Each structure stands twice: as structure tokens, then as C-alpha cells.
Amino acid sequence: MTANKKYKDGLFRSIFNNKSSLLELYNAIEGTAYQDESIIEINTLHDVLFAAMKNDISFAINNKTVILIEHQSTINENMPLRLLSYITRVYEKMTDKRIYNESMVKIAKPKFIVLYNGKAPYPKEKYLRLSDAFEKTDNDDLISLDLIVRMLNINKGYNLGLERKSKTLSGYADFVAKVREYEKEFPLEEAIKSAVKYCIENDILEDYFRQNLSEVVDMVITLEYNLKDAMEAAHEDGIEKGMEKGMEKGKKEGQSYVLELLAQGLSYEEIKKKIEEVS
């Protein structure tokens, strides 16, 4: 099993896919102090028909401000254009065709933020404008459309203010930094495993990693179910249902077993050997 090189994108979306983490992140970025999670309405695009039209995170605050946040591991000067396409779809969802009414439809004020944590050097903060991409014409006095993106470098040590205000974002930055540190000695897959173990031991996103232990287990072992349990269940419930039961039972037992070994301080290689011995 090979490690997903885009693990950071998936992890970022997973960590901030709840109102509590989003409110903390928004407060850190904007310097606000909101406490009530009910003011947040998540409206991230998950287009099943047009797979390319999906963004990382979008949510509204009191239906008065809509925030689009993208996570980037590479420097992309086209983010204003990408976010323009995203905000159009988000507004379509929020207004629900009311734009065809004669009376004015009030819409939430947009804010566009890109959080960068790639390896290439980048400033602590930078602004990108859609108008910078426009072709030059004879009359450039009037710009009918523009979109401003706030770029923030969230690599460890670049935005200490953000790290202090958002424990979740700080933990994410710590994890990525640890992966890069371990990558100097180990392949990416082993580096990710070691970074997860380090975070659990040092109370860095510990709750998240423990609650999503199945993903950690999947990085360590390829056996997703206990064959013995599956065969026993198959005799009772038929092959298809039996395999489902066996997979579920085996996976839960595997998670508990791996968590117990992690708590004992075993390395991932040692855990893998133990799993192979009992499989």
C-alpha cells in the first residue's frame, strides 16, 4: 500500500469539516470572537455530476458573509479565477433561483482565503487579484469585475498569530512539519505513520486521530477484515452478509489492537509484525 501524496488536502478537509473547527479557524483569521456554532452554515460544493466543480471549504456566517477557503500545497496564481467559478455555484445554491424575481435578492458578502503549506518559499501573507489576469486593452481605466484572494502561509512558524489563536490549525501545521521531518529518513508512507504516532503521544490533534483510527489502521495494514470471523458468519447469514459482518468485526478489533500497541509505545514496524503474526 502506497501513501497518498495528496494526504494534506484530504486531511485538511476532514479536520475542518465541522462547525466547531470552522468557527475556531474563522475567528483566528478574522480576529473575531464568535462562540455560537449555530451561526455557521456549511455549503461546500460536492457536485456529483460535475466532479471538477468542488471546493475545499465554504460556509456562511449568519447568512451575511460567505467564506471560501482553499488549501494549497503548490503556488497557484490562478486561484482568483478558480474561486470565481466556485462562488458562482455557491451563490446559486444560496439564492435557489430567486435571482429571477423582480425584487433585489440580498446576498452574503464574500471572502476568499487560500491557506498555503507547500515547500516552495512564499510570503507570510499576500493578496492575489483576478484583475491581474485580464488581458491589456486600450482602455484599462474601468474594471467591471474583480476578486481579491487573501493568501496565508500556514507552514510552521510563518503565522504565529494564527497558530496561537487556532489550536486545530496549529496541530495541522505540526503534523505536516513532522511528516517532512521524518521524510528526510523514511519513505512518505512511513513518515506519515510516524507523524500520526508522534501526534497521538504529544496531544497534537489527538482526538481527531483517535476518532479516525480506522484511517490510521488502513495505513498500517492491508488486511481489512478477519477471515475466520467472515467464514463463520457466512455459514449463518450467507456469504455476502457474512463477509460484511466479518469485515466490520475484524476492523473494530483491529483498531482496538493497534491503539493498544500504540499506547505501549511500539513503532509502526513492530505493530505491523505483530499483526502479521496473528493474521
Image (cartoon, rainbow, N blue to C red):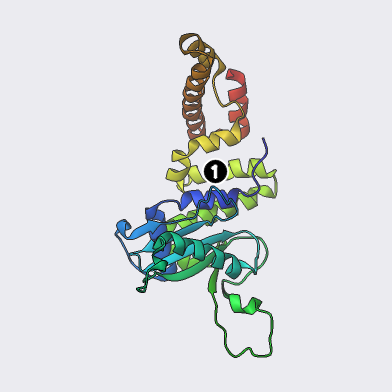
Q: Quadrant of residue 106?
A: bottom left
- Residue 60 left/right relative to 120: left
- Give the residue furthest to the top: 235
Locate residue 52 relative to residue 46 in the image: left or right.
right
x%, y% of residue 32?
36, 69
> Could you say where residue 61 lies in the image, as x and y percent from the top left?
36, 64
Local secondary structure at mark 1: helix
Q: Is residue 147 above or below residue 139?
A: above
Q: Residue at x 67, y 48 (%)?
A: 183
Q: Residue at x 65, y 78 (%)?
A: 134
Question: Residue 191, can we see it?
Answer: yes
**Residue 122: x and y, percent?**
63, 69
Q: Is residue 165 visible?
A: no
Residue topped by disc 1: 196
Q: Judge the density around disc 1: few (<14), some (14-19), many (≥20) Cα neighbours within 10 Å.
A: many
Q: Amino acid at mark 1?
A: Val
Which residue occupies 56% across, 64% down? 85
The quarter of the displayed image where residue 43 is located: bottom left
Q: Which of the two residues, 235 or 19, is positioned nearer the viewer here?
A: 235
| Vertical comparison of 205 with 267: above or below | below
The residue positioned 34% from the left and 73% from the top of the image is: 103
Residue 193: give x, y in percent of width and height: 59, 40
